[in-house]
């Protein structure tokens, strides 16, 4: 493909522990295309309503340093209750942020914000990350581990006057806004040189960064513009000490949430070249790197650069940039065609410059540069096949020649890898036959020219473009001869850069099958939208995986696809894909009671090469970013480490399609009906199901199901003579709109909370009412008790007074007795005194009895009074308790009424946020397989023996299948045998047996003859012949 000449000015970029493309540096592609995609905030791609599924658009920051812990925030769509981050390296962990716990409230999760920790031993590089929430596990985004200190764009630096201060040795995690620049202040010493790198495409960003350096007055001092799709980088040297302004903006002044970047400012190593760029597998090779600031052991060369040897181990592929089969080192277009490992230079601060070198087990040949490449007969580098050539398009109009011998009938795969190494190239390859002349000279006969691969034009601009500008061809050697290959770069007209590399690989054919799972897309959408999606299942639902098959280098035959790693309640019917198809669908089906689950799955393909059974694992892909209008801008895809599946614990899908069977057999000419059931859950409207993925000659009518109905019929029309015999697959797919409540569980929870508070409120009111009722009855109960207490008080007072009087009388009597006893004792003979004593003793006895009686009465009255007091106190206590209960109830009612107001408002808010809304949804049936047989007729007959000169008959039974009911014409043929004649006939529609008559004569030789019985019929106006071979034996006459 011819395009405008362009090219980066330098080769590789340095990267603090990561690998990136230098826009201003070509082999940048050998520089980690691996610093691949991440996209920020809700991009405009999802403009239509569909069932929610987690989509991760951005991380901030999207990187960090080993040995640090920091907060990270995610953004995207449908990230409700986002509570987990999963990184592709076990040394990077995350926990959802928690609020501070208080005495009144426990800690609560802050969904969408995480505390991330990177272990000290995590290598610098790019990793994948997914976020999980209520709607499953998201797509992946790239996350960078970088030894430089990360600072976050303040957001207040859109004006020169408010430039954000940064320092050398930092990386800024920022976002470009439309029609704006981000400004940073940087202090530099006189003569100080710093490297500025703007990483964006490698992080899945849409941004195409431009970096400018200016003085404080805004006068531009330097500008660095990269090639779109690569890292923008440059080196700036300060002429004098002072403050400089670094600005970054988008090439076309676009911006938004998905225009994020990492601006790296450092004095670390910078790579310009590495040689060799292809190293042998299974051993350690010394690679000579060229660049600046390469650290200890570096030496100066004639160009003023530094050179240094680095040992590269190709025995193992190191984490993280290799992923499976080295994918993360190379562009999507490389797929799994190459292995690559990094060559790295690390300074004392951990800043790492990285590039990729190709690993091969073929003999490696280094290109030999010549000065006569444009001569009629140029000098060619001799090669022996098979081999891989380490070459470069190092000069303007660089053409390289290679010469080899080959024999007629040999078949060689000739592949150029340059664009697939991330180089800004468009190679062209030409094959010439070397014809010797009589004078000893040679002439070149061009026999083949190849530019791009055959599918390149159709794929450019598609959502899943894995094509490249690299040519590949299969060379069928026409004759024993010497051949030459001429290799050009159509972008190299005026470029002079030694780092623009290529690998030319020539090898025998290796039949193989490659599987690619297309990026999951959000569904449904209009034809101009491509939306980042995920593979997710709801209970009772389905999910479709679109798989592309590439049968390469002579591989043919069926490929059986199956899925590994599914949870117990999810199934997927294996699919056998015949050579008729190069794409198919796998449909996952979740049980109605499927439990929530998430994890990786694998698509496995099994196929035959000769007698050998082989197995291949599908490559996984994802959209780096989508598009809301394919006519305006294209989507971009990349490889991913695995296929992630989520089974959601949310509501089941609104409808489900359940065919009566998913394996169906018919024949050419048949028109058959396959019943299906529509399981309705939340949708009762009409639905039309359209077939997807079937062969063009297999006619399948749309299935229209009326509103409220649950049955339908798949009408299959196989009445085409161009319909291939064998296995065919399709699914039914229908779009519908239904009322969907996004978070019905939140409404249920809010309603339950409202009911709970209302119950508490009712209980508090009931408590108050009961207390008030009691207060109302207590005065009536208290009055008689109070009166009784008054009477008891009076009685007790009287009894107390009587007791006091009696006690005093007893005291007087006792004193009188003492006096009388003293007088009597003094005059024992005085009768009067003795009589007075007796009287005094009697008086004491009487007074004592009266005192005892008064004491008893006093005690009884006091007990009665105590009882009366207790009776009154009991009522008063109940009165106090009731008053307290009223007060408590009033307080509780006040609190609960306030809470009720809050809960009512919350419920209203939740209901408002979760009103039933129209949602578009695509229902997909399970995968349906149709086996097409060539005919509905099955012929049966048994061998017979016929004596020479006699006649015989073979009864041919015809079985009619698949609805065929018509007449059949039977005939028979055989090899020419003297005297042998055969006769058939017409088999009526209502009969199933007809004889074939065999006649012999005396000239008919004895021996075995194979009869070919032929049945002719028309099935729905299509010829559906059938044949049957039956051996008969001609035996000698008796």
Image (cartoon, rainbow, N blue to C red):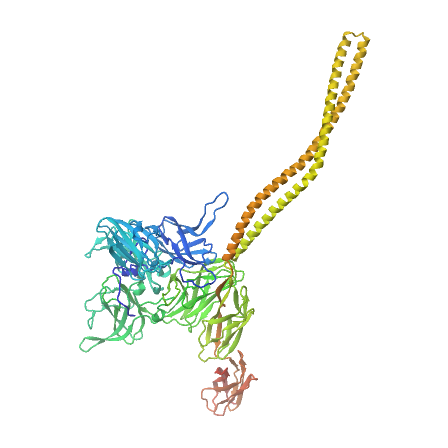
From what the image shows, is residue 474 above or below residue 957? above
Seen as rendered, the residue at the extreme bottom is: 1002
* Foreground of the two, 264 or 371: 264
Q: Is residue 766 visible?
A: yes
- Of 357 and 81, nearer the camera is 81
The answer, for residue 309, to whether it is visible in the render is: no
Q: Is residue 349 left or right of residue 1034?
A: left
In this rendered view, identify the residue nearer to me: 241 or 1031.
241
Nearer to us in this view, 358 or 180: 180
Q: How many marks?
A: 0
Q: Is residue 423 left or right of residue 1015?
A: left
Instruction: Judge from the rendering whether residue 477 lies leftward or rightward of residue 1038; answer left or right.
Output: left
User: Which corner quadrant holds the N terminus?
Assistant: bottom left
Rendered location of residue 560, percent (x, y): 44, 68
Task: Give the vertical position of 900 relative to 357 (above or below).
Answer: above
Residue 1008, compared with residue 337, is above or below; it is below
Question: Where is residue 227 drawn, in percent x and y?
Answer: 29, 62
- Residue 316: x and y, percent? 34, 57
Residue 228 position, x and y percent, is: 31, 62
């Amino acid at each position: 493909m011819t395009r405008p000449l362009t090219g980066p000015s330098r080769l590789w970029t340095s990267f603090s522990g990561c690998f990136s493309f230098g826009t201003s540096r070509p082999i940048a592609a050998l520089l980690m295309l691996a610093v691949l995609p991440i996209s920020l905030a809700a991009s405009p791609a999802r403009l239509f309503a569909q069932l929610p599924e987690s989509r991760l658009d951005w991380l901030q920051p999207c990187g960090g340093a080993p040995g640090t812990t920091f907060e990270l925030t995610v953004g995207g769509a449908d990230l409700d209750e986002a509570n987990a981050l999963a990184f592709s390296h076990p040394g990077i962990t995350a926990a959802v942020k928690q609020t501070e716990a208080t005495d009144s409230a426990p800690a609560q999760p802050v969904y969408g914000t995480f505390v991330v920790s990177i272990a000290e031993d995590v290598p610098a590089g790019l990793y994948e990350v997914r976020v999980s929430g209520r709607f499953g596990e998201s797509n992946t985004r790239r996350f960078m581990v970088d030894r430089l200190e990360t600072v976050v764009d303040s957001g207040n630096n859109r004006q020169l006057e408010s430039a954000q201060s940064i320092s050398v040795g930092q990386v800024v995690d920022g976002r470009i806004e439309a029609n704006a620049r981000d400004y940073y202040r940087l202090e530099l010493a006189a003569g100080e040189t710093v490297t500025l790198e703007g990483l964006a495409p490698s992080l899945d960003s849409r941004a195409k960064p431009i970096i400018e350096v200016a003085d404080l007055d805004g006068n531009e001092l330097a500008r660095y513009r990269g090639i779109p799709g690569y890292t923008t980088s440059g080196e700036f040297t300060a002429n004098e000490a002072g403050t400089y302004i670094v600005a970054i903006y988008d090439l076309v002044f676009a911006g938004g949430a998905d225009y994020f970047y990492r601006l790296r400012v450092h004095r670390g190593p910078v790579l310009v070249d590495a040689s060799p760029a292809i190293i042998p597998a299974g051993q350690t090779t010394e690679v000579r790197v060229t660049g600046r600031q390469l650290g200890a052991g570096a030496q100066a060369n004639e160009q003023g650069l530094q050179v240094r040897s680095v040992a590269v181990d190709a025995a193992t592929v190191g984490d993280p940039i290799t992923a499976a089969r080295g994918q993360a080192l190379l562009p999507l277009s490389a797929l799994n065609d190459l292995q690559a490992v990094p060559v790295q230079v690390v300074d004392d601060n951990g800043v790492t410059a990285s590039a990729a070198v190709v690993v091969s087990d073929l003999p490696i040949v280094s290109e030999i540069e010549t000065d006569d490449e444009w001569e009629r007969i140029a000098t060619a580098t001799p090669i022996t096949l098979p081999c891989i050539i380490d070459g470069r398009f190092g000069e303007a109009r660089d053409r390289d020649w290679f010469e080899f011998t080959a024999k007629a009938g040999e078949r060689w795969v000739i592949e150029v890898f340059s664009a697939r190494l991330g180089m800004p190239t468009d190679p062209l390859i030409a094959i010439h036959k070397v014809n010797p002349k009589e004078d000893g000279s040679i002439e070149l006969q061009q026999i083949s020219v190849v530019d791009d691969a055959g599918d390149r034009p159709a794929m450019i601009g598609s959502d899943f473009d894995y094509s490249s500008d690299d040519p590949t061809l299969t060379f069928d050697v026409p004759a024993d001869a010497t051949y030459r290959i001429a290799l050009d770069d159509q972008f190299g007209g005026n470029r002079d850069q030694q780092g623009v590399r290529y690998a030319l690989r020539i090898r025998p054919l290796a039949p193989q099958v490659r599987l690619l799972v297309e990026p999951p897309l959000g569904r449904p959408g209009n034809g101009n939208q491509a939306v980042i999606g995920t593979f997710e299942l709801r209970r009772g639902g389905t999910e479709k995986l679109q798989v592309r098959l590439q049968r390469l280098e002579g591989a043919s035959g069926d490929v059986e696809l199956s899925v590994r790693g599914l949870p117990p309640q999810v199934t997927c019917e294996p699919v056998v894909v015949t050579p008729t198809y190069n794409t198919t669908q796998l449909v996952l089906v979740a049980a109605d009671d499927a439990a929530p689950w998430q994890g990786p799955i694998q698509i496995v393909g099994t196929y035959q090469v000769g007698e050998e059974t082989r197995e291949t694992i599908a490559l996984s892909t994802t959209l780096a970013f989508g598009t809301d209008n394919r006519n305006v801008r294209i989507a971009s895809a990349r490889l991913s480490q695995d296929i992630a599946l989520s089974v959601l614990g949310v509501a089941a899908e609104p409808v489900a399609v359940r065919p009566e069977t998913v394996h169906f057999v018919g024949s050419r000419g048949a028109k058959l009906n396959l019943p299906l059931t529509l399981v309705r859950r939340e949708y009762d409207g009409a639905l039309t199901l359209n077939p997807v993925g079937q062969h063009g000659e297999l006619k399948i009518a749309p299935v229209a199901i009326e509103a409220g109905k649950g049955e339908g019929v798949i009408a299959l029309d196989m009445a085409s003579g161009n319909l291939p015999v064998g296995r065919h697959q399709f699914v039914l797919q229908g779009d519908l709109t239904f009322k969907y409540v996004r978070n019905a569980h939140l409404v249920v929870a809010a309603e339950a909370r409202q009911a709970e508070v209302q119950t508490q409120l009712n209980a508090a009111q009931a408590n108050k009412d009961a207390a008030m009722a009691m207060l109302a009855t207590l005065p009536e109960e208290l009055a008689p008790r109070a009166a009784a207490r008054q009477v008891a008080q009076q009685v007790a007072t009287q009894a107390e007074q009587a007791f006091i009087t009696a006690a005093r009388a007893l005291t007087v009597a006792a004193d009188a007795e003492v006096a009388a006893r003293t007088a009597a004792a003094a005059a024992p003979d005085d009768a009067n005194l003795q009589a007075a004593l007796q009287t005094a003793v009697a008086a004491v006895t009487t007074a004592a009895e009266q005192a005892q009686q008064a004491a008893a009465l006093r005690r009884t009255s006091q007990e009665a009074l105590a009882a009366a007091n207790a009776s009154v106190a009991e009522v008063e206590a109940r009165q106090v308790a009731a008053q307290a209960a009223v007060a408590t109830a009033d307080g509780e009612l006040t609190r609960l009424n306030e809470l009720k107001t809050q809960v009512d408002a919350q419920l209203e808010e939740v209901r408002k946020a979760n009103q039933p809304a129209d949602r578009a949804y695509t229902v997909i049936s399970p995968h349906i397989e149709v086996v097409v047989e060539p005919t509905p007729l099955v012929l049966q007959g048994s061998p017979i023996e016929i004596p020479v000169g006699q006649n015989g008959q073979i009864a041919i039974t015809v079985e009619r299948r698949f609805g065929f009911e018509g007449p059949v014409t039977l005939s028979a043929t055989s090899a020419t045998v003297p005297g042998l004649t055969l006769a058939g006939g017409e088999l009526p529609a209502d009969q199933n047996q007809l004889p074939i008559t065999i006649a012999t004569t005396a000239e008919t030789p004895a021996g075995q003859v194979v009869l070919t019985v032929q049945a002719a019929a028309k099935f729905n106006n299509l010829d559906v012949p059938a044949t049957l071979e039956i051996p008969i034996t001609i035996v000698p006459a008796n």
